[in-house]
Image (cartoon, grey):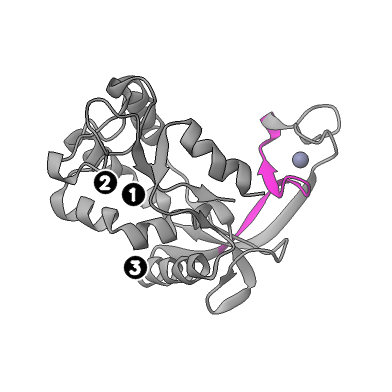
Amino acid sequence: MSAPFREAWPKLGCAFDDFIRTTEPRHEKWAAELWRRVKANGDLYLGAYEGWYCVGCEAYYTEKELVEPGNLCPVHKTPAERIREPTYFFKLKSYGERLLAFYEKYPAFVSPTSRMNEVKSFVRGGLEDLSVSRTTFQWGIPVPDDESHVMYVWSTRSATTGQRSRRIRSFTASGRPTCTSSARTSSANTRCTGPRSSCRRASPTTSSRSRCSPTDF
Ligand SMILES: [Zn+2]
């Protein structure tokens, strides 16, 4: 399953330092550590989530997204179930103002500008706390100290990459992001807003290669 993802990056002109699967023990270890740190910071609480759930997708849908009549999953075209389950929430709502202040301070953090404007508009529209655990299935990384929950897979993606690269820390320390993406033909699409010395691009002008840290499913 991982091979097509592994093979895709060279075709895109990317070289990666590491290839991490979320089933690897090192990912589990750091996802658990990330959870503990976020909890210690007071950003997690236990609540309940209710919504329209598709077992095939293992995902909730809003009423607008369902296909009528019959409340069908837009992907599977089978009836979604109304489910209420306990879940841990991340206090995303409390980060809205801080995010907006950050975007003002670092306008090149998201590019192009039109996309940054979309992001800011989304945040200004009001953030909701994020459901970050599941009890409706067992596969996944158990929540530390509450194994009736597994961490929602999307909430753990950055755990290992952030830990191993220290790029997050250097970002925090310098206050500026480092090189973030690449393109085969257009260097204009390779955004490097950090100091030249921290840019991880192999060649800033002619090479299509950048160093990415893709995460596998
Ligand atoms: Zn579905």
Residue 52 is one of the magenta-drawn residues: yes
Picture quadrant of residue 18: bottom left
Specify whether 13 is left or right of 216. Answer: left
**Crowding at mark 2 (Cα within 10 Å: few <14, some 14-19, many 20+):** few
Q: Residue at x 18, y 43 (%)?
A: 176
Three-letter amino acid code of the residue under disc 3:
Asn
Spatial separation of the CA atoms under disc 3 and disc 2? 16 Å
**Crowding at mark 3 (Cα within 10 Å: few <14, some 14-19, many 20+):** few
Q: Is mark 2 within 8 Å of ligand 1?
A: no
Label 2 belongs to which residue? 98
| 1 and 2 marks in contact (CB < 8 Å) | yes
Q: Earlier in the sequence, mark 3 or mark 2?
A: 3
| 3 and 1 marks in contact (CB < 8 Å) | no
SS at mark 1 in the image: helix
Part of the protein shown in magenta: 47-64
Label 1 belongs to which residue? 95
SS at mark 2 in the image: helix
Helix, strand or loop for the magenta stretch, by majority: strand
Spatial separation of the CA atoms under disc 3 and disc 1? 13 Å
Label 3 belongs to which residue? 41
Three-letter amino acid code of the residue under disc 2:
Arg
SS at mark 3 in the image: loop
Q: Position of residue 197 (x, y in %)?
A: 13, 44
